[in-house]
Image: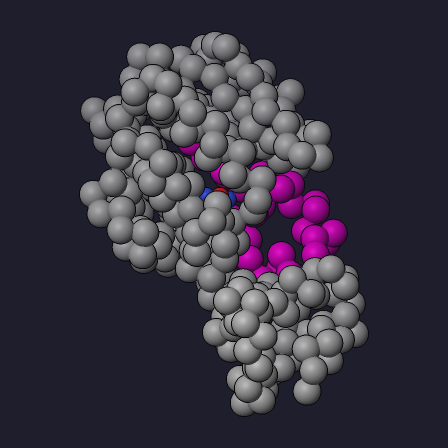
Amino acid sequence: MLITDIVKILTDAGIEQNEANIEVKMLIEHFAGYGIADIIMGTKLDEEKLKIVEQKAKLRASTRQPVQYIIGEADFMGEKFIVNPSVLIPRDETEILVRKTVEIVKENHFKTVLDLGTGSGCIACMVAKLTNATVIGADISFEAIETAFKNMENLKLFNRALFRKSDLFSMIREDEKFDVIVSNPPYIPPSMKKNIQKEVRFEPETALFTKDEKGLEFYEKIIKDAPKYLNENGYLLFELGINESFEVAQIMKNTGFKNIQIVKDLANIDRVIFGNI
Ligand code: GLN
């Protein structure tokens, strides 16, 4: 069995060549424990371990579930996060949201952050890791909170990243004020369900889709209540879905947010919006 044969299992299933190469590298690293040092040393991969990798590639090819769910981990900002079908797999674009949040927290010497819809806890954990702030991650899903908690433990962020089961602000007291509220909420309109990739169908629907056709449901709900939970001059930051920046900016302005700014991603798409109260 050659590594190229394993790559072919994936390309035969319609997975693009570059993606297949990356995924096989991930599978070999995880299931055969073969890392960069082994590549440099030219260590031979043993057949038995390669068999396991082959089986996992076959599982990936036949089910089309994301390789991160098969491995049980995803890379985000240089860290490994536990993932499972109860949480979204962290996307590279979300790093833009984390970086902006970290910048704002540091510049203003902020101390408290609330991450709504924390999922795997990737935003909450990275903001806690890269600043001195304490971050509360809230999620409606108990399984997500359990996953986020494990990620917090792995990153040793005890007492720095805390997690709470809460439907948006439902379990946040009004006297618990925050310097920053951040969220990467569900933002895909339901009409897009039929167009999404096979892999995305394994991710939790509640993390991806809104009920309204504009994809604005969660922005509207969060913006409406955020002023009650923000300290004076506190910031609100969101990740944005495609073509949603104009309307989200409008809702933020109408609710009294100022200095609204947008950050684009590498594909020149408006990806992050933020402003302060
Ligand atoms: N906060 C998590 C992330 O950015 C989950 C977001 C979500 O489920 N909508 O990956």
Residue 59 shows in this picture? no
Location of residue 55 by image quarter: bottom right
Task: Give the image location of residue 143, x and y in percent.
Answer: 37, 58
Span highlighted in magenta in the image: 182-209
Total count of labels: 0
Q: Position of residue 26 (x, y in %)?
A: 57, 66
Asked which quadrant contains residue 198, the reply is: bottom right
Q: Is residue 89 left or right of residue 167?
A: right
Q: Residue at x 47, y 62 (%)?
A: 73
Query: Where does residue 184 sit, x and y in percent of width and height?
Result: 49, 38
| Picture quadrant of residue 224 | top left
Side of 265 relative to 137 (left or right): right
Residue 277, compared with residue 81, is above or below; it is: above
User: Would you say residue 276 is visible in this rendering?
Assistant: yes
Q: Nearer the viewer, residue 220 or 143?
A: 143
**Residue drawn at x 47%, y 32% as measured from the top left:** 99
> Image point 51% across, 77% down: which residue?
32
